[in-house]
Image: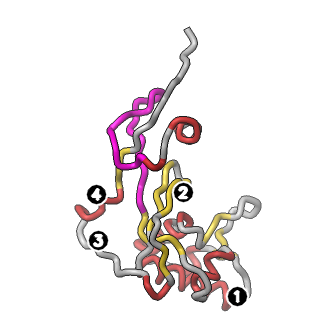
Amino acid sequence: MQQILFNQYLDPIELKKGKLKCPCCNRKLAAYGYILNKDLIKLAEMIYDHCKKHNSNYFKPKNIFLEELKSITSFPKLKCHNIIAKDKKTSMWKLTKIGKQFLEGKIKLPRKVWVFADKPILYDDTYKWIWEVEENWKKWSSDYINDYIIQPYKTELNLIK
């Protein structure tokens, strides 16, 4: 339902304004910003190496990250940057063509992606080569507050009376 509301009534450019709630469920509408940093690049390179070794673009996270909890919970952020995707037919993860090109230094990707309801909605104007990606500056849990911004919406809902 929130994705439908977003597509019809929300303006992704207005990400940093307001504190409105969903008219249906009264939940805050939130967008999250994910910065492409060296920690994520390290995970992407592990995926790339695994896929190259097995001559396949498909992979199972548990075969790459073993028991690294931080890695297993962080790697899905690569999907927001279109480096990996989940195959709808097989439900397996795969390295995308864009991800492979980026990791091989052939294309740039946006530095930051804003995500709403698990879908990218807004891309940063700054694009980076793989070798230009910055260190993760977030060291404390309070640093992550900058990744969360309330998403306002514009609505002209016609309620049935």
The quarter of the picture where the N terminus appears is: top right
Q: CA distance from mark 4 to mark 1?
A: 39 Å
Q: Residue at x 69, y 62 (%)?
A: 91
Mark 3 touching mark 2, by CB under 8 A? no
Mark 3 touching mark 4, by CB under 8 A? no
Give the magenta part as a residue range: 14-33
Q: Which residue is mark 4?
A: 145
Q: Nearer the viewer, mark 1 or mark 2?
A: 2
Q: CA distance from mark 1 to mark 2?
A: 30 Å
Examine the image and state in which quarter residue 59 appears.
bottom right
Q: CA distance from mark 4 to mark 2?
A: 19 Å
Q: Which residue is mark 2?
A: 120
Examine the image and state in which quarter residue 64 appears.
bottom right
Of helix, strand and loop, which one carries label 2?
Answer: strand
Mark drawn on residue 54? 1
Examine the image and state in which quarter residue 70 appears.
bottom left
Q: Residue at x 35, y 59 (%)?
A: 147
- Picture coordinates of residue 141, whole percent (x, y): 25, 64
As drawn, is 17 to the left or to the right of 77? left
Question: What amino acid is found at the position of numbered circle 3 in the picture?
Answer: Lys
- Picture coordinates of residue 37, whole percent (x, y): 41, 76
Q: Nearer the viewer, mark 3 or mark 2?
A: 2
Q: Nearer the viewer, mark 4 or mark 2?
A: 2
Mark drawn on residue 21? none
Mark drawn on residue 138? 3
Question: What amino acid is found at the position of numbered circle 4 in the picture?
Answer: Ile
Q: Residue at x 59, y 81 (%)?
A: 107
Mark 3 or mark 4: which comes first in sequence?
Answer: 3
